[in-house]
Image (cartoon, rainbow, N blue to C red):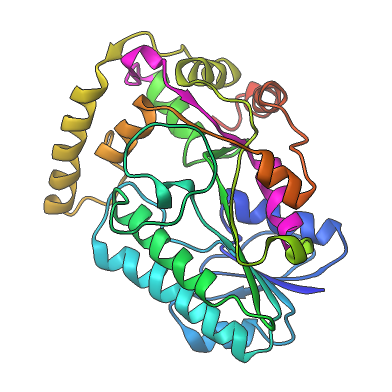
Amino acid sequence: MKVLVTGASGLLGREVARLLVRQGHNVTTFQRSPSGIDGVTDVRGSVTDPVALRSALKGVGGVIHLAAKVSFTGRAAEFDDVNVRGTAHVLSEAKAAGVREMVFVSSPSVANSGAAIAGLGAGPADPKHAHGHYSRTKAEAELLALAADASDFRVTAIRPHVVWGPGDTKLVERVLARAKQRRLPLLDAGAALIDTTYVDNAASAIVTALHRMDHVYGKALVVTNGEPRPIGELLAGICAAGGVPAPAWSVPGRVARAVGSVVEKLWILTGRTEEPPMTRFLAEQLSTAHWFDQRETQQLLDWKPAVSIDEGLAKLGQYYGAGQHR
């Protein structure tokens, strides 16, 4: 099959494209910067540009849509433009090009209003109650994607939760940098139980969804490793893999949430573009339980994660151990 992968310059998008190539698919990648992936046709462009999308979609039978604005802060219009209108463009142009199947890569945060999640499945996307512009716009985009599902254009939404792995600049390398500077606190002593997803497992589930469309079209599924752990334990494991001291001081979660709300406003008011040290959404994620029932996901996909959390941490240690990547 000829498959288009949008957003292939990110950690997860790269691994999705590489896996498709290994499986023998004809892969086109579409993003604003070069993907650097061997064996693909690389097309530069933005999902906000329908003309560029039209060119990338020629002859494509399946789409995996990962491109998104992912940030803890920023102006609402930026998220709306890429995550909502960009997804609408992908849907419209894909249907016009005769694409038969699409996997929309979403996020469990689309159904999270800030409360703890313990053993639940994928609830409905709820932009009205989602916290932060990223979650709100991803929820709106998921609703658009699933509403487009039809007999001649089948769509599923896969929600990988907290994806990490070697070379991860969104989570792992931020944790290592802040821990090295002794600026990484635990919230509520790091006791919150959370699910995460090693990048190879997330990519495998997403590609499997494209192959199992008969079983998953019209549905939203959360994907995780299925190994919930206290966040303090996970952070300690990442720090050990990177050779930096684990966080040893704690801040009450309610204090971090209040501080995060103030920091978010200051970042927007001052126009700063780097990620803030704390936001309300981040504080919620670090201080409340987030783990999911994986039975439906694994049954419908006929899939299980191949890399355990401990094996993933070992791979981090191999990657960062030489010091050249820090």
Q: Residue at x 48, y 81 (%)?
A: 89
Where is residue 275 drawn, in percent x and y? 32, 43
- Count how many numbered circles sit on residues in the image: 0
Q: Residue at x 74, y 61 (%)?
A: 215
- Residue 181 falls left or right of residue 165: left
Camera-side residue of 49 and 126: 126
Q: Is residue 185 magenta?
A: yes
In this view, the residue farthest toward the right is: 24
Looking at the image, residue 124 lies above or below residue 144: above
Where is residue 32 drawn, in percent x and y? 51, 69
- Residue 156 falls left or right of residue 161: right
Residue 292 sits in which quadrant? Answer: top right
Residue 105 sits in which quadrant? Answer: bottom right
Q: Is residue 195 magenta?
A: yes
- Residue 303 falls left or right of residue 53: right
Q: Residue at x 61, y 86 (%)?
A: 95
Where is residue 101 drawn, in percent x and y? 69, 74
Q: Quadrant of the N terminus?
A: bottom right
Looking at the image, residue 133 lies above or below residue 141: above
Looking at the image, residue 88 lies above or below residue 173: below
Q: Residue at x 34, y 57 (%)?
A: 136
Where is residue 74 drawn, in percent x and y? 26, 55
Residue 200 sits in which quadrant? Answer: top right
Camera-side residue of 279 and 205: 205
The magenta segment is: 181-210
Camera-side residue of 173 and 281: 281
